[in-house]
Image: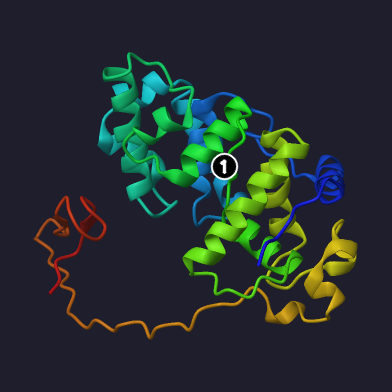
Amino acid sequence: MTYKMTPDIVHALVEWFHHNKRVMPWRGETDPYKIWVSEIMLQQTQVSTVIPYYERWMDAFPKLSHVAETSLQDILKMWEGLGYYTRARNLYRGAVYIINVLNGKFPGTREGLMKIPGIGPYTSAAIASIAYNQPYGVVDGNVSRVMARLYRIGEVTSSARFKETVTDLVNQSLTWGAPRWVNQAWMELGALVCTPRPSCSACPLESFCEVRQHLCVENYPVRPNRKKSPVREGAIFIIQNPQKEILLVQRRESGLLPGLWELPNT
């Protein structure tokens, strides 16, 4: 089945966005470094949690060179509490690469961005679109949910066909507006209105929405069957010396939670 984006949908979306978008410290930025940091921090983390971390980060490292010049341990300390520390490691690796290999110049194309360690398809599209206004669709979970409902897409969200369909629709939408704003508008709609429990009456696309018209919002998007999570059992040891210092061990640099400190365990 072929799905077609229309200019009426995009114009309604962008108009809504400019009247309802949230205020964020990185909103309106075109500096690729700042957009990169915000996008990495926002992965699997809520905006309200990210904002103070982003502001502290920019106070400590206002320029990309400041990240490359510090130590990884200082980077991890700055990241402390935000979780998913691999993100911080990738930021550090990428900053060192840009400074040492690219002479401090951020790539101006998506292809160039993809060569930076730790930057993949999603982040490269986000930077190219928001920083350089290039027409690359940015598809996250929020955008996928919006498209699944708007077009009543029946494929399972984990399927390659579903992902290709959503990406194609977003790319089509960039024809009728500035890519940096259209991409952010789709993400904002999914975050504020077309949530897992949507506010359909407040949606600027309600009149275009297939699942709304068919009264089957609760059935979309179509999720894959969840696999049962494995259970791992073990023992944790608290070892303390006479000075009441507690022994910590550092995890290996590969595998789960690389390089972090923890109590000895089995």
Lateral position of residue 265 relative to residue 212, left or right: left
- Residue at left offset 56%, top offset 65%: 162
- 10 Å neighbourhood of mark 1: few (<14), some, or many (≥20)? few
Lateral position of residue 86 relative to residue 30, left or right: left
Local secondary structure at mark 1: helix
Q: Is residue 56 visible?
A: no
Which residue in the protein does label 1 denote? Answer: 52
Q: Is residue 200 visible?
A: yes
**Which residue is at the front of the view, 247 or 181?**
181
The quadrant of the rendering that contains the N terminus is bottom right
- Residue at left offset 83%, top offset 39%: 18
> x%, y% of residue 130?
61, 33
Lateral position of residue 169 relative to residue 118, left or right: right
The quadrant of the rendering that contains the C terminus is bottom left
**Which residue is at the front of the view, 195 or 153?**
153
> x%, y% of residue 10?
80, 46
Lateral position of residue 257 relative to residue 254, left or right: right
Name the residue furthest left. 242
**Which residue is at the front of the view, 119 or 175?**
175
Q: Amino acid at mark 1?
A: Pro
Q: Above or below — where is 170 with respect to 101?
A: below
> x%, y% of residue 247?
13, 59
- Residue at left offset 69%, top offset 57%: 191
